[in-house]
Amino acid sequence: MAALGWLTPRRRSATARSVLAGEAAAEAARKTSLQLEKEREEAAEAAAAEAASEEPEFPVAGDDRAAAFFDLDNTVMQGAAIFHFGRGLYKRKFFQRRELARFAWAQAWFRLAGVEDPAHMQEARDSALSIVKGHKVSELMSIGEEIYDEYMADRIWPGTLALAQAHLDAGQKVWLVTAAPVETAAIIARRLGLTGALGTVAESVDGVYTGKLVGELLHGPAKAEAVRALAAAEGLELARCAAYSDSHNDIPMLSLVGHPYAINPDAKLHKYAKEREWRLRDYRTGRKAVKVGIPAAAGVGALAGGTAAAVALHRRRR
């Protein structure tokens, strides 16, 4: 057998084989480590890109430089507040059937067209001013509480109320902004648990309405000016604030903030909002909302839970 030794390779010593195995293992480990590091970097880059594409959580909890501004008619509540208020006053014999018909016509137009017609709003304003002239502010406030329960409480959009509640839960103030009388708007805001309201101010002397306005109807550009003035007084940063409305007439207000929402939008606002990738949500049908960057607070899951909670809270406040 010894004679056949030349036919086989010379075997290395145990020490040499150990060195070779160790070197091979070290080289393999180095290559594996580099590959794993590359994979980790790629995974981190992908996660960062995905996170960047997702909208950050909104509203931001604890951001006291932010607030939310909600239009009232057809955004928070179905129909026009001034019409419902007029119905209540008619029931209490504040005016005649002819004047109620004028309110009814304005409301019918609003519901069918889904927009605020300036001429109709002017007519409703003039009618309301003539009706309240000579009455005490305290009297109308007391009656307003009753009218809210009779005609308005069941016309609140639960979805919009859930959005408002999300801002409140984040520690932010929530304001109504409406052409309705500020007294009526304040009642609705208080009943819904909101911070307060910006509304049309009717002149009063010694607590009695004179039948005149202070300035003009809080409508269109006037709403934007009211929001701007309140933001300055409250120390808010408008770029961090949100605004919600159904009407193209409120584009000045919506354009003023960093987070504009189109709620139950009319045709003009819907088109305007889609072109600018504003957030859209429609509660007028059972269809899912058009998703244009809907934030977490208004997402389907959050909205479902928030809606139930908001409705329950609203009912308790009543």
Image (tube, rainbow, N blue to C red):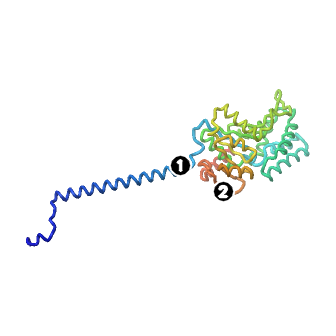
Where 69 sits versus 21, above or below? Answer: above
- Which secondary structure lies at badge 2? loop
Farthest residue in the left direction? 2
Distance from disc 2 to disc 1, alpha carbons, whole Å, reads 25 Å
Tell me which label, 2 or 1, sits earlier in the chain. Answer: 1
Res. 193 in view: no
How many C-alpha atoms fall within 10 Å of the one at disc 1: few (<14), some, or many (≥20)? few
Type of the residue with mark 2: Lys
Q: Give the amino acid at mark 1.
A: Ala
**How far from the left and from the top, in percent, is residue 207?**
82, 29
| 2 and 1 marks in contact (CB < 8 Å) | no
Q: Residues within 10 Å of mark 2 (few under 14, many from 20)?
A: few
Q: How many marks?
A: 2
Residue 93 pos. (x, y %): 88, 41
Q: Which one is closest to the eye, mark 2 or mark 1?
A: 1
Q: Answer with left or right where residue 154 lies relative to residue 3.
A: right
Q: Residue at x 61, y 36 (%)?
A: 65
Residue identifier under label 1: 52
Question: In this figure, which residue is indicated by the disc labeled 2?
Answer: 288
